[in-house]
Amino acid sequence: MRRGMTKAQEIAADLREQIESGDLEGGAALPSEAEMMRAYGYSRETIRAGVRMLVDEGLVVTGQGQGKYVRQDFERVVWNWTTLESRSRHATAVEGKTAGDQWASAVSGDGKTPRQEISVSIVEPPEHVRESLGLPEGGLAVKRQRVRYVDSRPYALADSYFPPDLVTGTPLMEPRDVSAPGGVLASVGLIQVRYRDEITVRMPAHKEAELLALPAATPVAEHTRTGYDADGKALRCMVTILPGDRHKILYEVDSD
């Protein structure tokens, strides 16, 4: 037994070293409980306790049946929030080379296949969204809810909220990919000239983990972006949930 460790900690440490060294690669099955019982000379419950530590850390995931596997990392998608909402970039997109909205266009530009599951409803928004949009207590918003996939794997959740009077009768009420030169809001005369961003890093809610197929111990970034017109009126509040194991967020900021 390793000095200062329990038997379960010893098993976890040994398997962790094999994962970190690459001896056990992402997606590889761990040795069976019977194999580890023979190798370590410990009981089945001790083996399970050691493996459970790695599951809690997010290094090991449970597959179909009772098998345990080394967590396989996703390819990270770079979100360049500096240009993602650029009206000029969107307006000059080449016809036929974009795929729906700006997010889908950016993913396609990286040679990947985007897909979104979209629903639209009228809801009482979360409190921080209601405050960002300047809605009264109990006020309603149009919610455009999207589960975003890259190459058929769930990558993000994106919920956009709008004051109902601004978007009723526009394509934003339709549960499908919609786009327009400069953006759909701009196409109906609602120009976002300024954004306010808030980023919170936290553990996911149960529903978020379920929709995104998140392994245990996977944090998410909650990115809230509120867009304002030239008069300072809030036009849209978008809340995006970005799993920490499949995204890199990029900003470029001028020093002046």
Image (tube, rainbow, N blue to C red):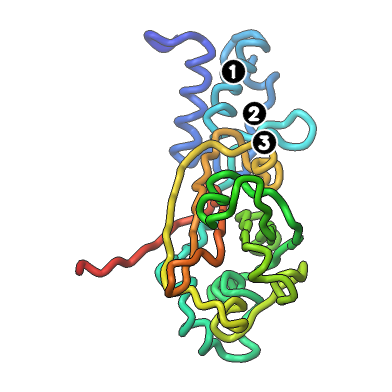
Image coords of residue 38 (percent x, y): 64, 15
Residue at position x 61%, y 72% in the image:
104
**Local secondary structure at mark 1:** helix
Vertical order, 224 against 253 (above or below): above
Q: Which mark is residue 206?
A: 3
Under mark 1, the amino acid is Ala
In contact (CB < 8 Å): disc 1 and disc 2: yes
Category of crowding for the residue at label 2, using alpha-carbon neighbours closer than 10 angstroms: few (below 14), some (14–19), many (at least 20): some
Q: Nearer the viewer, residue 184 or 128?
A: 128
Q: Nearer the viewer, residue 37 or 131?
A: 131
Mark 3 vs mark 1: in front: 3
Residue at position x 56%, y 51% in the image:
129
- The earlier-in-sequence mark between 3 and 1 is 1
Extreme right residue here? 65
Image coords of residue 80 (percent x, y): 44, 67
Q: Which mark is residue 140?
A: none
Q: Which mark is residue 31?
A: 2
Under mark 3, the amino acid is His
**Local secondary structure at mark 3:** helix
Residue at position x 55%, y 39% in the image:
218
Please indicate whether residue 189 sits to the left or right of residue 144 in the image. Answer: left
Residue at position x 62%, y 63% in the image:
162
Q: Which image quadrant for residue 156?
A: bottom right
Q: Which residue is mark 1?
A: 39
Q: Nearer the viewer, residue 55 or 253?
A: 253
**Local secondary structure at mark 2:** loop
CA distance for labels 3 and 1 = 37 Å
Image coords of residue 130 (percent x, y): 57, 50
CA distance for labels 1 and 2 = 10 Å
